[in-house]
Image (cartoon, rainbow, N blue to C red):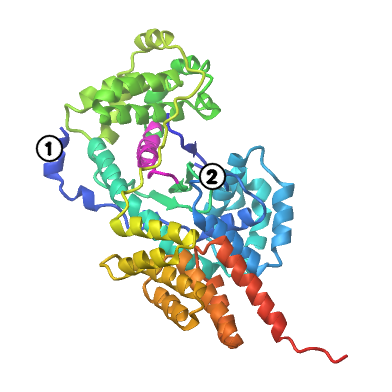
């Protein structure tokens, strides 16, 4: 059903809307955020050689940028971190990622990475790797990760903005259906972290102490369904413990789930978890309306054998006024063992999960200016400089957005350089920088300005230009390498010659 990796570690709707119009405003501040602890730990893990998903088109550019950031700073602790990670590899990349994420969430984060729990309360999956924490503190300092995290904020803010409204609506929908008066449970916190340095298309949930964390990695479309699924789990799971005696009376059904090839051992060994997850799928099916019966059948075939019983019981829940947290006991008590035994016996368990395909959204149609710039670049490539320049000038003189005008100025700067008009070339590249260019144009304009400064015999200015190009977040690899190579050449030329 849900593609999320989950773990239980340590531990009438319209009427409601009319009566409680403030529900939608009760999303806690910071419920959707980026984590400095995750940022530092995954920077270290990636630098130590973890490359799962690195070549995926859905991997966020920040991941490669941070590899370059660490390479430039060459922190002394990296070699020991690399040895530590290599010697303690998990069985699979997914398990490797999950346990380092769990470890990060169990600390107070940078700069010290001190554990938040007593040793006896730390999750078992982190035990083999807890010795890395002192190294992480050193690495964080040596690699200047406070500054790196500050510079990365625009990337996180952009992704968080894509999630904010749909996640708010999804949590509101869940609270509304469950008649939950707040967006959480008293004494427990629900927190979603966006993590851009991890492999794409992954959702991991962890219950650590009183905190329920959901970690979402890059994906073509926001993983709102998975976040709502985790939020429902966060709300429903404690109820199976509260109503444990009622649930124990239904435990004879547990053995009927053992034959499911897809049901994780976690649910085969813990009937309360199986009941909670079945209830989550039942609520999701009710929220899906006409698609509900198909979702129930899918959950049952994957081994969540109480989904159909809870789905039926929710019909009665919807007709009364109690909240879900109070009514859930009646739902458990309504389970008829003989009826469910017969129903489950008719289920043919699935041998392969149903995969929800996440397709990348279609790119927005190009604006006239973007089409012109694309045509101008093609003309420039075949060295039809006159025709290319005419199009670049037309875009520059238009009412296009500044970054598009910056692309036009950058094109005109290159044409002037080809025509040996160095003064005009410099003016166009400087104008490029004034127009809020994208990282590609910004970095290359600085490289060209560095070359022009060298031609003007101003090595100090040239060094400043190259260094500025290297500092551009999101610069192309080619621009970065050009700046590095030319800066090294310049430095070598400036070294005093030794007397023979």
Residue 487 place in picture, x, y as percent: 64, 76
- Indicate the quadrant containing the N terminus: top left, top right, bottom left or bottom right: top left
Q: Viewed as shown, does residue 236 lie left or right of 262?
A: left
Q: Which residue in the protein does label 2 denote?
A: 56
Q: Viewed as shown, does residue 72 lie left or right of 309?
A: right
Q: Which residue in the protein does label 1 denote?
A: 15
Q: Is residue 478 magenta?
A: no
Compare marks 1 and 2 and give the one earlier in the sequence. 1
Q: Residue at x 64, y 49 (%)?
A: 50
Specify start and end residues of the magenta stretch as a single range: 219-240
- Indicate the quadrant containing the C terminus: top left, top right, bottom left or bottom right: bottom right
Q: Is residue 222 magenta?
A: yes
Residue 400 place in picture, x, y as percent: 28, 65
* 10 Å crowding of disc 2: few (<14), some (14-19), many (20+): few
Asked if residue 304 is positioned above or below residue 168 in the image, the reply reads above
Residue 27 place in picture, x, y as percent: 29, 52
Q: Nearer the viewer, mark 1 or mark 2?
A: 2
Disc 1 is placed on an element classified as helix
Asked if residue 243 is positioned above or below residue 450 in the image, the reply reads above
User: Which quadrant of the figure has residue 486?
Assistant: bottom right
Q: Residue at x 74, y 48 (%)?
A: 87
Disc 2 is placed on an element classified as loop
Q: Residue at x 34, y 9 (%)?
A: 339
Asked if residue 420 is positioned above or below residue 408 in the image, the reply reads below
Q: Main secondary structure of the magenta part?
A: helix
Residue 385 place in picture, x, y as percent: 44, 66
């Amino acid at each position: 059903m849900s593609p999320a990796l989950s773990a239980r570690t340590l531990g009438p709707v319209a009427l409601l809307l009319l009566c409680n119009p403030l529900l939608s405003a009760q999303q806690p501040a910071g419920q959707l955020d980026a984590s400095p602890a995750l940022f530092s730990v995954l920077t270290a893990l990636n630098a130590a050689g973890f490359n799962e998903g690195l070549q995926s088109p859905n991997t966020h550019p920040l991941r490669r940028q941070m590899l370059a950031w660490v390479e430039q700073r060459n922190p002394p602790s990296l070699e020991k971190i690399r040895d530590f990670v290599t010697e303690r590899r998990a069985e699979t990349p997914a398990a490797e990622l999950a346990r380092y994420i769990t470890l990060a969430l169990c600390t107070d984060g940078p700069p010290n990475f001190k554990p938040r729990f007593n040793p006896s309360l730390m999750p078992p999956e982190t035990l083999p790797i807890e010795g890395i924490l002192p190294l992480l503190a050193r690495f964080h300092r040596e690699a200047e990760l406070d500054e790196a995290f500050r510079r990365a904020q625009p990337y996180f803010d952009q992704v968080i903005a894509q999630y904010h409204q749909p996640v708010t609506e999804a949590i509101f929908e869940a609270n509304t259906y469950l008649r939950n008066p707040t967006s959480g449970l008293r004494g427990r916190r629900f927190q979603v972290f966006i993590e851009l340095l991890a492999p794409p298309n992954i959702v991991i949930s962890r219950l650590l102490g009183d905190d329920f964390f959901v970690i979402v990695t890059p994906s073509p479309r926001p993983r709102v369904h998975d976040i709502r699924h985790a939020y429902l789990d966060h709300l429903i799971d404690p109820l199976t413990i509260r109503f444990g005696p009622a649930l124990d009376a239904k435990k004879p059904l547990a053995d009927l789930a053992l034959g499911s090839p897809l049901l994780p051992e976690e649910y085969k060994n813990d009937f309360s978890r199986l009941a909670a997850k079945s209830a989550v799928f039942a609520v999701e099916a009710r929220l899906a309306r006409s698609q509900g019966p198909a979702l129930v059948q899918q959950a049952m075939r994957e081994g969540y054998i109480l989904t159909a019983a809870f789905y039926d019981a929710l019909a009665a829940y919807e007709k009364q006024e109690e909240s879900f947290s109070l009514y859930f006991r009646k739902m458990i008590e309504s389970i008829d063992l003989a009826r469910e035994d017969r129903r489950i016996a008719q289920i043919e368990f699935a041998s392969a999960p149903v995969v929800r395909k996440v397709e990348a959204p279609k790119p927005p149609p190009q604006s006239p200016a973007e089409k012109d710039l694309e045509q101008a670049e093609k003309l420039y490539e075949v060295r039809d400089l006159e025709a290319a320049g005419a199009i670049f000038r037309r875009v520059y003189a238009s009412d296009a957005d500044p970054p598009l005008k910056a692309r036009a100025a950058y094109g005109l700067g290159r044409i002037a350089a080809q025509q040996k008009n160095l003064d005009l070339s410099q003016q166009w590249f400087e104008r490029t920088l004034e127009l809020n260019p994208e990282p590609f144009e910004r970095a290359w304009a600085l490289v060209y300005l560095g070359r022009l400064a060298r031609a003007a015999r101003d090595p100090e200015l040239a060094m400043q230009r190259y260094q500025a190009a290297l500092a551009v977040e999101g610069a192309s690899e080619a621009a970065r390498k050009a700046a590095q190579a030319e800066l090294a050449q310049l430095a070598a030329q400036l070294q005093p010659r030794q007397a023979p």
